[in-house]
Amino acid sequence: FFFFSSRRRHTRFLPVSWARRCVQETGVIGAAFRRFVYSTGRALRELGLAMDARGSRLTNDAAYLEQLSRHRNIMPIYELQPSILIDSFVAPNATVVGEVLIGSQSCIWYGAILRGDNHAIRIGNHTNIGDNTVITTSMALPPGIPESVNIGNNVNIQQNCSINSCIIDDDCVIGFKSVILEGVRIERGSVIAPNSLVPPGSLIPSNQLWAGSPVEYVRDLRPEDVKTIRDMNEDSVELGQEHKFKVLPDVLDEYKLFQNLENPTSYIKAKDRLNQE
């Protein structure tokens, strides 16, 4: 498709990509254009599925009767797109939606849900998000309270946790089935014991152990505790890399491509480049 343009008796054709770039830079019109492109793409996908089912009926192919899962574990919402470094592991049945940024060698384990549909979710390097953990953001909070979720490096969030609009600094551990509510800040190296509830707006000082519902101070962490936490997190990262290469056999080629890139890039961009080669 081309747009037609005429100037000074000269006729020229403008490619759609040029027109799209111009429209995207015009604020509200650009947002409306992006949503139109998104809706058009989804309509084409649905049309393709319907045509495939119809063709299967005409050729007496029973494949269309099979109930396939249409789960997409990495899904954008309009202009909100996930950005995942290629050496991170996202389990096949995990869900990453919207503006979610995941750093290097982090692990999103089975059944985890990261919903960046309201505000951003940022996850650092070598961080583990345990099985069935849910991370969401609030629509609106009082002034001064960040609405996004910011999780640092070397953080270990264990299974079945619930986390909403908070800040978790580097080297922290969130125990099984813990709940972290809005406006919480957990400082570097702290540990939240399993089955704990951290009330909204709480501040957990660094290198301390807190437990209970609601949480209360227990004790300061000892040097041996810090070493155990570090070793546990490294083991989880290594295990995530093993799952990555066993669950997705073609990822090894993608990882080699990532290592050869001059600058780190997102999972989607690196994969597109691999497909082009």
Image: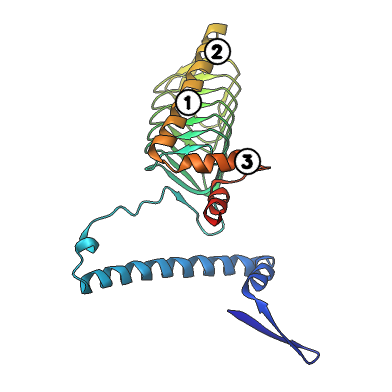
Count numbered badges in the picture. 3
* Residue 226 image label: 2
Q: Position of residue 255 (x, y in %)?
A: 53, 39
Pick the quarter of the image with the C terminus.
bottom right
User: Distance between the Cα atoms at labels 2 and 1?
Assistant: 19 Å
Pick the quarter of the image with the N terminus.
bottom right
Which tag, 2 or 1, sits closer to the chain's start?
2
Q: Residue at x 62, y 74 (%)?
A: 16
* Residue 260 image label: 3
Is label 2 in a helix, a strand or a loop? helix
How was this image coloured? rainbow
Establish if 227 lies above or below 166.
Answer: above
User: Which residue is nearer to you in this view: 212 or 226?
Assistant: 226
Q: Position of residue 172 (x, y in %)?
A: 54, 23
Q: Residue at x 48, y 39 (%)?
A: 252
Check disc 1: other Cα within 10 Å, few if <14, some if 14-19, many if 20+.
some
* Residue 176 image label: none
